[in-house]
Amino acid sequence: MTKTRDTYKYQNFFKKRKILLSVLFISASIIAVMSFYFGAYSFYHKLFPFSKATTTVTQKSEYLYTAYNDIEKKSYNTPGYSKYGSIAFLNDKLIYMQGDGQQIFLFDGENSNFEFKNIKAEKLPIGRDEFIKKHEKIHGTARLKNFFGLRDIMISKFKSFNTTSIFVSSLDYDIDNDCYRISIFRNEFVVADKTKLKKWKKIFSTKQCLTEDTNYQKLFYLSGSGGRIVKYDENNILLSTGNFDGDGFYSSYIYSQDSSNDYGKIIKINLKDSTSEIFTTGHRNPQGLFLVDKDYILSTEHGPKGGDEMNLIKQGKNYGWPFATFGTDYGSKSSKTDKTKNSHDGYEKPIFSWGNQFAASQLIVYKSDYLDKWKGNIITSSLAGKRLIRMVFDQERKSIVYTENIPIGKRIRDIVEAPNGKIALLTDQMGVDGFKEVPEIIFLEKKLNKK
């Protein structure tokens, strides 16, 4: 009898323990999902310590077989999670800045000791932490962390400054007025030490400050920002700006066609006196900007569904958005704002337009002889398409006469040409509300034929 009662107690104990463990597991799962959904980034990483983010850099190699060149693709994981971000070259060294604007690195990939060297610099003074704290309860911490921050970096010399300058475009929070803009910050490397920066100086901000009331749904359309920077001449730079969905469809505002604001435009900024002027109008979300010379400036921009564009940029021209597009409203076969029956008549037409699921990002015009037969070609990167498009542009006819798809298999945020002719890419993580993938730096170089 005693043995049977003990056995019963033993079985009952383990039954209760099993139920308790099941309840704890289910509760932990629910909390994890809710925390992840509502943006509890730190909790997510404490709960799942097997995060792929690591300071140890590894190299992965594979081969791409393109029409004219066999390419070796070398990939290196960055030191942590980051959406957006940008890359540029300082002489022959790659500079990488995370999308949060809080860390900047010099990448050394020339030997087997791959390393991201931390460049000493203050955090980009954009009020990011204050913005997130103010709005995280409604909009989610992870979503705001993912989208509020850096858009582009450019490194160049100008006659106006004695040393090489680094320019950063970023969303910028006005704490006192609870609104945000796109601003450009300038810095310079300490001459004797290329791993140290001075203090950031704000040199430009868009005129109108935006709030969540910009659109009908009272959401922050932070991704519709543009933000690319290029050197125009020794005294001026160009900045692309998105319309943040102020397009007459999601909002009563139509920023791109309104000259009283700086959104949905390409802006020319004078570095000497900090004045600015509208260079072109009618843009939706220009993600790419590249200047060969003043008569050969290219831009890529996100359109609505099936309406991504590549434009030849000419000062004073109107590129149509939202009154002219080859795209359609999501979930529809037409566009409520288009006035041209998807013809673009009456506005500057794109030199190329993609169908659905491409999401053009940055582009370059390749200059080197290093990769045979690519010299002078346009190479455009994509996010949703996870590929590069190599294009042959007929400058006399102002048209694209050939395209080649080059699969990369990753969302590509940025592309730059190295001084030695190699091509560097920065990938971007998947997801809106979470931290799901560590970005990579990818180098495309000639495949060596080993004997």
Image (tube, grey):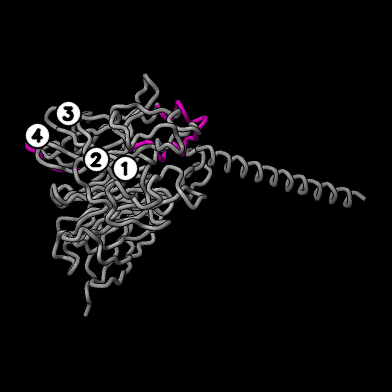
Is residue 409 placed above or below 193 in the rendered structure?
below
Q: Badge 1: how crowded within 10 Å, few (<14), some, or many (20+)? A: many
> In the rendering, at what x and y percent does residue 199 appear?
20, 29
Q: Badge 2: how crowded within 10 Å, few (<14), some, or many (20+)? A: many
Mark 1 lies on residue: 283
- Mark 1 vs mark 4: in front: 1
Mark 4 lies on residue: 161
Which amino acid lies under the numbered mark 4 shown in the image of this protein?
Phe
Q: Badge 3: how crowded within 10 Å, few (<14), some, or many (20+)? A: few
Which amino acid lies under the numbered mark 1 shown in the image of this protein?
His
Residue 274 got which mark?
3
Q: Is residue 269 magenta?
A: no
Question: Nearer the N terminus, badge 3 or badge 4?
Answer: 4
- Mark 3 vs mark 1: in front: 1
- Mark 2 vs mark 4: in front: 2
Q: Is mark 2 on a helix, strand or loop?
A: strand
> In the rendering, at what x and y percent does residue 3 appear?
87, 52
Q: Is residue 413 visible?
A: no
Mark 2 lies on residue: 280
Name which residue lies at 15% across and 33% down: 270
Labels 1 and 2 touching (C-beta < 8 A): yes
Residue 68 got which mark?
none
Nearer to me, 209 or 126: 209
**The magenta segment:** 131-160
Question: Nearer the N terminus, badge 1 or badge 4?
Answer: 4
